[in-house]
Amino acid sequence: MMTTLFKIIGWGLRGIVVLWVLASLGAEFVAPYKPNDIVGQMWNGAFWQDTSETARQVLGTDQLGRDLLSRLLYGTRNTLTVALGATFAAFAVGIGFGFWAAIARGRIDMACSRVADLIIAVPTLIVTLLVIAAVGPSVGVLVAIIAVVDGARVFRLARLVAMNICAMEYFESARLRGENLRWLMLHEILPNVRMPLITEFGLRFCFIFLFIAALSFLGLGLQPPEADLGSMVRENASAISFGVLAPFFPAAVIAMLAIAVNLSSEALVRAKRRA
Amino acid sequence: MTLLKIDGLRIEVEKDGGWTEVLHGVSLELARGEMLGVIGESGAGKSTIGLAALGYVRAGGRFAGGSVVLDGTELIGAPTAVLEGIRGLRVAYVAQSAASYFNPAHTIGDQFAEVLHRKRGMKRAEIDAKAAQLYAELGLPQPERIGGRYPHQLSGGQLQRAMIAMAMATDPDLLIFDEPTTALDVTTQLDVLGCIRRAMARSGAAGIYITHDLALVAQVSDRIMVMRHGHTVEVAPTRQLLSAATQDYTRALLKGLRSERVEAAARPADERPLLRIDALDARYGTGTKVLNAVDLRVHRGETVAIVGESGSGKSTLARSICGLLPPTGGAMIFDDRELPAQLSARKADTLRRIQLVHQLPDLALNGAQSVGKIIGRPAQLFHGLRGAKLAARVTALLEMLELPASYASRYPHQLSGGEKQRVAIARALAAEPDLLICDEVTSALDQLVAAGVLKILRKLREEFGLGMIFITHDVATVREIADTVVVMRHGKVMNAGSVSEVLDQPDEPYTRQLVEATPEMDPDWIVRVRPDFARVA
């Protein structure tokens, strides 16, 4: 009974998120206003709160009087793109080094693993703040930092699952054929470790998404006037004391996206296991 | 008097969301003190019927009909309390791999004591005395003290015996032996088999002995039931079944591996060997030597069998030849040239010319690749075949291994064990090697399937003049396939020469021991080789 209820909620949530993401991809056509146009007063309420003639924005306006719905759509797209790019970068780094370490073993494995340990041992946020303070905030820097920091975590998983495959006799056969590193990684290991990596991708994506939102909240992510979910929460934070829901909407989008991605990756693995 | 009566038993397992019947109405009767051998290939349903005698069916399965009556009690659908009073107490089960059934964190004695203490309320001192008595009966060393040891301190054969002792602790009426010696070396197998035979005769319990080896089951059972695909093929008293089987399938099993052996033509004395190994030493890390001054000669078109028990170094020798474990001393000469020790130092052409086929086909094939890709890759890599030529080559290889061409698009999990092993051989042949190393390629296969693989290997050797190294622990397989044989033990060569020289009248003591420990299709064999295992009246 409860599980059925959870299932329905889960599918409903994912449905809404898919629609939302599609809408954000076509923000130019869907959004009622341009993201940076000032269309009203500061912090107009949402349509059910503010029924006056001057407030015609669906979810109200932000601290500069820009349309909140439009900015949410553009912001989702921006944050999502950066988070996705950063996750792919982290996986490329982590899988590449992880598989290499598992295949090569010995000194290479030792060197890679110790470097990964070192990166994991250092508090992520502090390192990120330091680097950004040194080189200045930009999308490229952000992606690079995440690729290294989260890549180290992906590395540990990738190395572990690859080690199991390297002990297999078909892998030994491939080595005896003298296959190169590229073939060993892409044809012998990767197809056999997809499942744990996909699960990790879902989880890691959520972390990175939240991390980027947090950095933006601190003012170190995407720079204004670019719309982005984290900075929208911060910019509108003080509105909450006036009973305006402006900071709630971007926060809700962050939460829903994180949950939906996680549910989907889990469902994918479960379906694969059944088959 | 009937102890166990199984009547029209049907069992279904869950498959693809539906139920598939795997046991199609099997019946058997077992008298008190009688030993029934159940034999069949994997998937025949023999383990399923063994577990059914405990009123148990594996997770994902269910009883679909028939009855299992133990001494007047119906076990199917019986309440848990009834079953708990029977399992482990009146019916005990001995599994194939003792190593995975013992809890490594507790001593043998503690695990032995558990049932007797909890279900019979016996004192620990009484239990230990009983354990020591059983250990002694089963021929375990230091029976008074072995109970204080942990599982990892015992050898495989000792663990198996300790497990049998545990099963016999409660003086059960019925013991189920599920392949109790399959994981053991032949000489150890002989000991364990003899102990089972002796202990069963003394205790007067009935038994069901499940195995895939007809020669083995003939030594311990009064009657034999042959199973296939979840049906009973034939049931008969042991001697009658061996001498006058009525079914074709049973006759095929009896014939087993035996076939007409073709003696290789004598080779000129001055012929250079394809592979010459002199005084090879190897070790893992800084441990003790696993290979100690090993010599080996392999000629073109010749099959050299390397036979020995686990830990004899036979697989290590193969790994050294392949370059997976660089030797620490000695010389390897391949086709008149020094063979580099390191894999990375070998040229692509050298890699092509030496091919290895592994023991377990399940691990040897990449499950994410189609059969066509698996077989085609060496042809692509070494011979640069592409497109239609590659596809034609794959088809030709599949045909050579007597597999349908349509298998190219299948994946390994869609194949049976024997088919997988043939694909692994096809992959090795795709490279067009000069030397083929087969590491226990038939050990994991059923008897008839193994016979099929051996037949193909013989054919290939004749067709291509391959030099072949065939590693096995089974003397019968050696006789089947090899021209010359090398007997190894503890990393040393004990004996070498032509098969008839070495195996027919073995002079060397270890070789004799190995030859004698190989079960023969004769119920009197065990008493002949080990008179101390004669049944006690």
Image: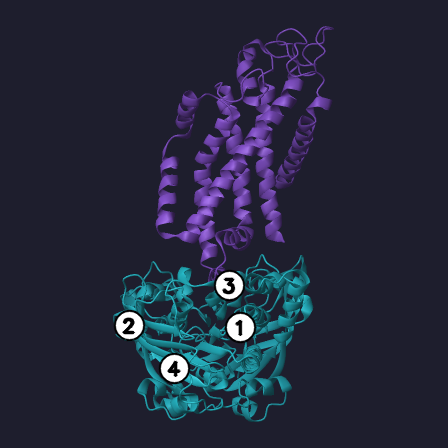
Find residue A264 and report its image quarter.
Answer: top right
Do marks 2 and 4 share a chain? yes
Q: Which mark is residue B236?
A: none
| Mark 1–mark 2 distance (CA, rounded to whole Å) | 30 Å
* Chain of the residue under the numbered disc 3 shown in the image: B
| Mark 3–mark 2 distance (CA, rounded to whole Å) | 45 Å
Work out whether residue B32 or residue B378 is closer to the camera in this orientation and state it: B378
Q: State the residue position of label 4.
A: B486
Query: Residue type at mark 2?
Result: Ala
Query: Which badge, 2 or 4, is on the more N-terminal residue?
Result: 2
Element under disc 2: helix
Horizontal side of residue A175 vs B390, given as left or right: left
Q: Which mark is residue B129?
A: 2
| Mark 4–mark 3 distance (CA, rounded to whole Å) | 27 Å
Q: Colour of chain A?
A: purple
Q: State the residue position of label 1.
A: B50
**Mark in the foreground, 3 or 2:** 3
**Residue at figure coordinates x 47%, y 90% from the top left:** B523
Query: Residue type at mark 4?
Result: Val
Q: State the residue position of label 3.
A: B363
Measured as percent of width and height from the top left, residue B164 is found at: 40, 73
Disc 3 crowd rating (10 Å Cα; few below 14, some 14-19, many 20+) is: some
Q: Colour of chain B?
A: cyan
Query: Which badge, 1 or 3, is on the more N-terminal residue?
Result: 1
* Chain of the residue under the numbered disc 2 shown in the image: B
Disc 4 crowd rating (10 Å Cα; few below 14, some 14-19, many 20+) is: many
